[in-house]
Amino acid sequence: MRNRGGTQPSPISQADVLEAALRVVERSSLEDLTVRAVANECGVTAPAIHYHLRGKPALADRVVEAVADRIRIVIDPDDSWEDQYIGLVRAMDRDFLRYPGTGMRALAADGPSAAAARLTTTALGILRRGGFDESEAREIFTATYLMFVGWLATRGRSQSGMTHPALAAAGGETTGNDGVDALESALRRLFAGTRDGNNKERGRDEHREH
């Protein structure tokens, strides 16, 4: 049966297409995602995929949104704000690493993303509950965001046993991001500096008041 436009209805659903695309990306990377690859995964022809997604850009966007939306955020209220924040970063690293290339596209995209906004809102909420005012929370979030984007940019290289030239120049062959523990260590150093800076600032304010 044909629709009014004369196009043969697809024998698969949008959910089928998305799950197939996720499998393709998980096995390789977002760069290798093509309409033809998804069609082969589904056992259909490329036009059946185009019927739902209208080409690779829409397909990639849906995959990235799905990956970001699947990141499981678990906040333990008994944990410190630092541990809560690290937990969020670890969850993001785990799922973005599972689907190579999706993290950079999700965090560096120009357009709006409901899933990315959810991650940002969660991160800012942790910082606000940690006692930071709005300006401080946004400043810390921006610093950690830029750090994480840089981490993602070189993550694939380290997974292939290579070190980015900039990292190699900073510390030789042992410097890299071959495990999320290295990122956690860097974040905790940043958090420690933030705490020290805030304590000094509050001390100066109290001194002026007296």
Image (cartoon, rainbow, N blue to C red):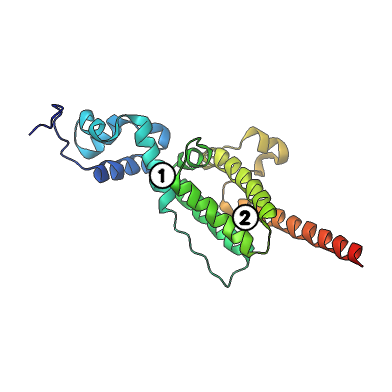
Residue at the top extreme, as displayed: 6
Q: In which quarter of the image is the C terminus?
A: bottom right
- When asked about the image quadrant of residue 147, the answer is top right
Left or right relative to 188: residue 50 = left
| Res. 196 in view | yes
**Crowd band around label 1 with a 10 angstrom C-alpha radius: few (<14), some (14–19), many (20+):** some
Q: Which amino acid does label 2 sit on?
A: Glu
Label placed on residue 65: 1
Towards the viewer: 134 or 9: 134
Residue at 62%, 55% (x, y): give it.
184
Which residue matches tag 2? 184
- When asked about the image quadrant of residue 128, the answer is bottom right
> Eyeballing the image, is 146 above or below 39?
below
Task: Using the numbered discs, state the Cα–Cα distance from disc 2 to disc 1 in whole angstroms.
Answer: 25 Å
Towards the viewer: 21 or 13: 13
For label 1, the SS is: helix
Q: How many marks?
A: 2
